[in-house]
Amino acid sequence: MLDQICGHIHNYFAAAEDVRRGSYSIESGSIELPFVREGQYFRIVGSALNDGVYPYPAVGLKDEAFTGEIWPMRVPVDVIKLAEEIEGWQSRCGAAAAGPFQSESFGGYSYTKASAAGWQNAFRSRLDRYRKLA
C-alpha cells in the first residue's frame, strides 16, 4: 500500500543525493544494502521482478541480478500510520467503493455514489500535505 500511496502523491520521500544507481543482486529472497538502516523503507527501480517499496531487511523478493536504482526513503511516521489506516479502510470499504454501481433506485428510494470513490478520494485531505507536483 505504501508504494501505491507514494505513487499517488508523487513523493517517495527520497533525496536525490541518496539514490544509488548500480548493479544489484537479490539472492535467497533478500538483498544486502549497507546504506539502508533496519526498519527503513527503500524503493527498487529498474528491476524486472522486484520494482516497489519494501521495509529493510526485505524478505520474499524474487532472485535476480539487475542494474537499477535503490532509493533509501525517509517516510514520516504519520504517512506509515496513514498507510495502515488506508489498508484497514480498503478491507472494510474498498470493494463497495470500487463496485460497478454508481446509483440505484427502488420503491421511492434513490441513492447516488460520489463519482470519485476510493481511498484516493477518502484520504485526499490528509494526503495532500505530502503531495509533490508530477
Image (cartoon, helix red, strand yellow):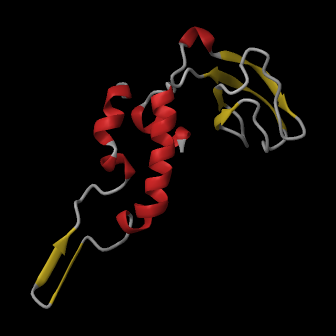
The quarter of the picture where the N terminus appears is top right
Is residue 134 in view from this perspective?
no
In this rendered view, identify the residue nearer to me: 11 or 74. 74
Q: Residue at x 71, y 19 (%)?
A: 36
List x then y, in percent, for residue 131: 36, 28
Q: Identify the residue at horizontal 55%, vertical 12% (top origin).
A: 16
Residue 90 screen position, x and y as percent:
46, 57
Q: Is residue 21 visible?
A: yes
Picture coordinates of residue 60 (x, y %)? Answer: 79, 45
On the image, which quarter does residue 45 sit in? top right
Q: Quadrant of residue 96?
A: bottom left
In the rendered view of the protein, which quadrant contains the C terminus? top left
Q: Residue at x 40, y 62 (%)?
A: 93
Of residue 91 and residue 61, the one placed in the foreground of this image is: 91
Position above or below: 129 against 22: below
Left or right, 106 with respect to 86, comes to left
Q: Is residue 49 above or below residue 97?
A: above
* x and y, in percent, of residue 132 in the image: 37, 25
Q: Is residue 35 above or below residue 10?
A: above
Q: Quadrant of residue 68?
A: top right
Q: Is residue 107 left or right of residue 82?
A: left
Name the residue at the bottom extreme: 107
